[in-house]
């Protein structure tokens, strides 16, 4: 498998090749709005290159991610088979694992999807290729870098997992494969932390693939307990879908893109969804919208809102000047607004960072210049210090990609792992400067706790607790959780 700047080739599956090669974006200029700080400039082999995967903050307070290339195994993979890295402090990077470390690359190659830290403290992720059957893997990674392959895909149960995983409230991990299944259009699976996999759904199960094709993105669990996601193609208009699936594998198509004339509602939703504080889901499309100014008459992409019943509202159509081609999803920050990236467009054609309210008011915060990054493919992550972190697959001092931060003036907060639990269960609360904590409350009810480190607290869900905000009282003030903790 080879990768080219601006456009990538895939395996010999022509339809999916064409879909992925929409990275060949054209360039439109507009103005830059804000300065981004580079945290990491990747150096290539052996230090890592092309950070396609999103970032995640661990309970240690460090930032974890993966690069598609890099590592010492250049004889098997041109430019290396990919790495998992950790960022400590202001930008000190350590490589936790370099893929294809085992004979035959049985540990996997090419990690596209973001890691997820599970309730047991381990990180879980996927590789696009490699493993026993060369169709990708699911792996477990300790915080110190010990990697264990817990599943090898074999085509029948799915192949080439592009997106990452999500841990459900039941403790299982859920994900998608881009290909595989009986018709080779992708699957949805459940896997236990120990590695027992169950295929929940195989796409193109309906005539003409009206249920969707090629799920690129990770899933998200809604507050109703169901899983929500997107397919990049298929549906009644063959331009992608939004779907809901329950834990038993019953899938409902909520929306078919390009349902409006000229596809003003967007199409090719490569990105996944987020459930925002208003109970609706938000996402992006790569093409479509009300502008056709991106050079090939297809529309520059959209930001949309969709209800659990399937009502879709286009919040913004990109014009090129404010960005174009949104491959990444969104994150809701602690100010209630949504933040994201566009792969191209902006003042220099290298992509943008933007902020958009849930009502649809969009502000371009930054246009990339190349030196601070180029072509941000994945979305942003808000760390507990309040800053937003992201990656660009090219650019930086050696053109191997960057990790950057955006300071939007947002204050620190705490996160909880897991974000749901029963009374009497233990959770880990993590953040910054937790030493000296005097009180922890669950929606106002005091809890017993133990300080594990300056960045982590172990707390017990107290009797009488109800779903709501967790607050931690420290010598420097009270920190609130960024999402609602749900008491089961």
Image (cartoon, rainbow, N blue to C red):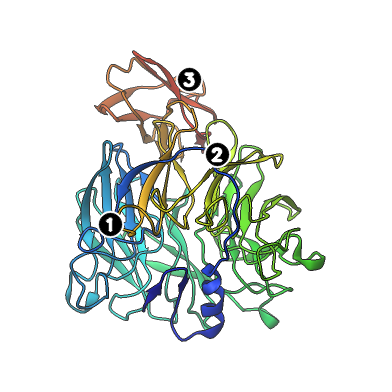
- Mark 1, secondary structure of its residue: strand
Q: Which residue shows up at 26% across the image and 48% down it?
A: 86
Which residue lies under the disc numbered 2?
A: 33
Q: How many marks?
A: 3
The picture places residue 182, in percent across and down from the top left corner, at: 52, 84
The image's mark for residue 251 is none
Query: Which mark is in front, 3 or 2?
Result: 2
Secondary structure found at label 3: strand
- Residue 371 in the figure: left or right of residue 179: left
Image quarter hosting the N terminus: bottom left
Residue 139 vertical position relative to residue 452 in the rendered view, above or below:
below
Q: Nearer the viewer, mark 1 or mark 3?
A: 1
Query: Could you say which disc has been placed on residue 445 in the image?
Result: 3
Q: Position of residue 195 (x, y in %)?
A: 33, 64
Q: Secondary structure at mark 2?
A: loop
Residue 451 in the image, given as x and y percentages of width and height? 27, 25
Numbered label attached to residue 84 = 1
Up the image or down, 405 lies above or below 159; here it is above
Q: Is residue 117 visible from the viewing direction of this image?
A: no
Q: Residues within 10 Å of mark 1 (few under 14, many from 20)?
A: many
Which of the 4 image quadrants contains residue 223? top right
């Amino acid at each position: 498998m080879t990768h080219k700047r601006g456009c990538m080739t895939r395996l010999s599956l022509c339809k999916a090749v064409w879909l992925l090669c929409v990275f060949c974006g054209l360039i439109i200029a507009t103005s830059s709005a804000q300065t981004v700080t580079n945290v990491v400039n990747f150096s290539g082999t052996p230090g890592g290159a092309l950070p396609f995967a999103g970032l995640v903050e661990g309970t240690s307070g460090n930032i974890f991610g993966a690069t598609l290339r890099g590592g010492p195994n250049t004889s098997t993979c041109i430019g290396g088979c990919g790495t998992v890295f950790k960022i400590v402090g202001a930008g000190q990077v350590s490589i936790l694992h370099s893929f294809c470390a085992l004979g035959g690359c049985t540990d996997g190659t090419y990690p596209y999807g973001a890691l997820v830290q599970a309730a047991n403290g381990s990180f879980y992720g996927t590789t696009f290729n490699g493993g026993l059957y060369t169709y990708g893997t699911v792996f477990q990674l300790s915080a110190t870098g010990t990697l264990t392959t817990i599943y090898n895909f074999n085509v029948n149960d799915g192949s080439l997992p592009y997106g990452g995983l999500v841990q459900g409230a039941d403790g299982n991990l859920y994900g998608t494969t881009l290909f595989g299944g009986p018709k080779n259009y992708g699957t949805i699976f459940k896997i236990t932390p120990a590695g027992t996999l169950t295929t929940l759904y195989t796409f193109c199960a309906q005539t003409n693939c009206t249920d969707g094709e090629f799920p690129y993105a990770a899933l998200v669990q809604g507050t109703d307990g169901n899983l929500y996601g997107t397919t990049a193609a298929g549906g009644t208009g063959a331009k992608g879908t939004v779907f809901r699936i329950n834990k038993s594998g019953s899938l409902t198509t909520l929306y078919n893109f390009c349902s409006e004339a000229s596809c003003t509602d967007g199409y090719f939703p490569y990105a996944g969804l987020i459930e925002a504080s208003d109970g609706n889901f938000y996402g992006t499309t790569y093409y479509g919208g009300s502008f056709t100014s991106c050079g090939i008459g297809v529309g520059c992409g959209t930001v949309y809102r969709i209800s659990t019943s399937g009502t879709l509202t286009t919040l913004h159509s990109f014009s090129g000047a404010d960005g174009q081609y949104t491959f990444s999803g969104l994150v809701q920050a602690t100010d209630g607004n949504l933040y994201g990236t566009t792969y191209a467009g902006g003042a220099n054609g290298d992509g943008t960072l933007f902020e958009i309210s849930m009502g649809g008011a969009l502000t371009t915060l930054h246009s990339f210049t190349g030196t601070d990054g180029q072509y941000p493919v994945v979305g942003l992550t808000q760390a507990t210090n309040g800053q937003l972190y992201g990656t660009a697959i090219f650019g930086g001092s050696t053109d191997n990609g960057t990790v950057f931060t955006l300071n939007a003036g947002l204050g620190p907060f705490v996160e909880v792992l897991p974000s749901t639990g029963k009374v009497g269960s233990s959770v880990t609360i993590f953040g910054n400067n937790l030493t000296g904590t005097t009180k922890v409350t669950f929606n106002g009810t005091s809890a017993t706790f133990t300080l594990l480190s300056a960045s982590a607290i172990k707390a017990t869900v107290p009797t009488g607790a109800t779903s709501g905000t967790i607050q931690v009282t420290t010598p420097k003030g009270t920190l609130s959780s960024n999402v609602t903790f749900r008491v089961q």
